[in-house]
Image (cartoon, rainbow, N blue to C red):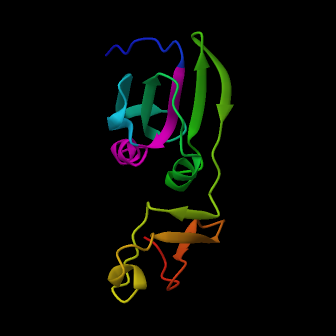
């Protein structure tokens, strides 16, 4: 398999295997007009298998979503064909519009205009809870 060289763009690496498409959707990469490559189940020494997303164009990333998916994700910023910065997102304190509350009695189930918002309840275990009803996210 051959993927072209990135001149100016982003490489999102160490995505847990099978979660690349989910991240692709959350980040809205389908709306981009530049080249985007999604590599699934690539071999990894650290993870066994991983997904990788390569974007050949300057984009704004939502680091809260990246941190929520997995804080071990690595973001390489590429400029003039070389990696100029390597970033590691952290678990966000709150996450909005990504997780849906599974409590059928939650106000977000009856009031569709309310945002689905969760707060970080346990950083060590990565547990999020609904800010309205305190239900634990999956």
121 vs 46: above or below: below
Point out residue 124 in the picture as x, y percentages from the top left corner. 66, 65
The quadrant in which residue 126 appears is bottom right
* 47 lies left or right of 89: left
Q: Nearer the viewer, residue 93 or 39?
A: 93
The part of the chain drawn in magenta is 9-27
The residue sitting at the bottom extreme is: 105
The residue sitting at the front extreme is: 113
47 vs 79: above or below: below
* 86 lies left or right of 132: right
Q: Nearer the viewer, residue 82 or 14?
A: 82
* Residue at (53, 39) in percent of width and height: 61
* Residue at (46, 11) in percent of width and height: 5
The quadrant in which residue 56 appears is top left
Q: Nearer the viewer, residue 57 or 43?
A: 57
* Residue 21 shown in magenta: yes
Point out residue 65 in the picture as x, y percentages from the top left corner. 51, 51
4 vs 58: above or below: above
* Residue at (58, 20) in percent of width and height: 78
Q: Quadrant of the N terminus?
A: top left
* Residue 63 shown in magenta: no
113 vs 3: above or below: below
Q: How many marks?
A: 0
Q: Quadrant of the C terminus?
A: bottom left
Point out residue 17 in the picture as x, y percentages from the top left corner. 39, 43
């Amino acid at each position: 398999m051959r993927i072209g060289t990135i001149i100016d763009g982003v490489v999102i690496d160490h995505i847990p295997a099978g979660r690349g498409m989910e991240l692709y959707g959350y980040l809205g990469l389908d709306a981009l007009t530049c080249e985007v490559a999604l590599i699934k189940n690539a071999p990894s020494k650290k993870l066994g298998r991983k997904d990788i997303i390569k974007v050949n164009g300057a984009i704004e990333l939502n680091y809260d979503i990246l941190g929520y998916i997995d804080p071990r994700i690595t973001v390489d910023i590429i400029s003039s064909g070389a990696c100029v910065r390597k970033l590691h997102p952290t678990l966000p304190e709150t996450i909005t519009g990504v997780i849906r509350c599974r409590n059928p009695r939650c106000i977000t189930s009856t009031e569709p205009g309310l945002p689905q918002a969760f707060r970080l309840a346990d950083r060590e275990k990565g547990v999020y809870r609904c800010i309205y009803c305190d239900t634990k996210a999956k």
